[in-house]
Amino acid sequence: MKQMVGVLLLALLLTACAGGQAEETQGSKQPETSETDEKAAEQRNGESDKETDEESEDKNSQSEADEHKKDETVVANAVEPKYEITDTWSFKPIDQANEQVALLTFDDAPDEHALEIAKTLKELEAPAIFFVNGHFLDTSEEKKVLKQIHELGFAIGNHTATHTSLPTLSKEQQKQEIVGLNDKVEEIIGERPQFFRAPHGQNTEYSKQLAAEEGMLVMNWTYGYDWNAEYQDAERLADIMVNTELLYNGANLLMHDREWTAKAVPEIVKGLRGKGYELLDPSLIKTP
Ligand SMILES: [Zn+2]
């Protein structure tokens, strides 16, 4: 895929090279660090509400000059999405893609276990999205971890700068939480997130608008358990994640950067595959 993008990019460069617009960055991050997990919103079956939105992604090959950003956007859009999100946060094939898929997502990253989780997934060749919080991206060490996760091939999603409940914030604060984090992530990995998940799944009309303007797909989840005391154990968590009655085609699985979750990952991946599920590659998901 990268190769193909490279070839396409090269072709575009040869034919037309347009001027680029410089991306501006405004890094903002709020100092707040309220990190909590989706415990509040937990729905065992998780879905909560509304919205979807989108965004474009800019994949920039830093090797090439940024003057070709426009061309890159064209290339990005050329990638055919095979799945789209539903009203209940699951995924369905756009055409003939395999419908028995499940998406793995990890929120509140990169705290202490995200890199380990990413390495485990990589060994298992299992794709996933890591939804990151800005308050875990302050030090150079933390930034390095994010870079490593990204370089292992995982999608990086936006889970806001400080993990504060969006409905409690002003518009300007919501913008800092969402756009500010995208700026920060881009500074670190060279790309802006294409997926957005609100803290506790609490979206607002304005946050959905911002996500859309940023080209991010908003997604909550269909089920998750690792914040429940009962499942803060690798074995019990792996069992429920695979055997819950909430597992169905297109399921969107919520997990977190937690010790027991990190330990449960191999069994969750094997268990889902054992039941016939293909783990959904985020790059095949349609974004706005
Ligand atoms: Zn969270």
Image: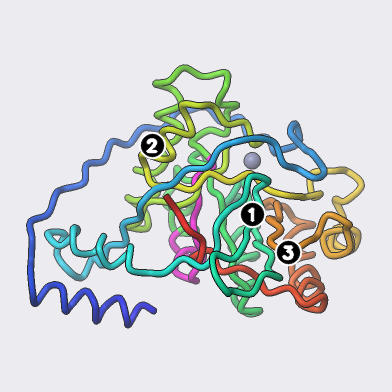
Q: Which residue is mark 3?
A: 249
The mark nearer the N terminus, 2 or 1, is 1
- Amino acid on which the number 2 mark rests in the picture: Val
Horizontally, residue 16 falls left or right of residue 87, namely left
Residue at figure coordinates x 39%, y 79% from the top left? 1
Residue at figure coordinates x 65%, y 62% from the top left? 103
Residue 106 numbered mark, or none: 1
Q: Which coloring applies here?
A: rainbow
Tag in front: 1 or 3? 3
Rendered view: 37 above or below 278: above
Q: Is residue 151 magenta?
A: yes
Rendered view: 67 above or below 276: above
Can you give x and y, in whole percent of width and height, for residue 124 in the image? 66, 79
- Amino acid on which the number 1 mark rests in the picture: Phe
Residues at badges 3 and 2 in contact (C-beta under 8 Å)?
Answer: no
Rendered view: 251 above or below 182: below
- Amino acid on which the number 3 mark rests in the picture: Asn
Q: Which residue is mark 2?
A: 179
Q: Residue furthest front?
A: 95
Rendered view: 153 above or below 21: below
Task: Give the secondary structure at mark 3.
Answer: loop
Can you give x and y, in whole percent of width and height, for residue 199 in the image? 61, 35
Boundaries of the magenta span: 147-159
Local crowd size for mark 2, using a 10 Å CA cut-off: few (<14), some (14–19), many (≥20): many
* Image mark count: 3
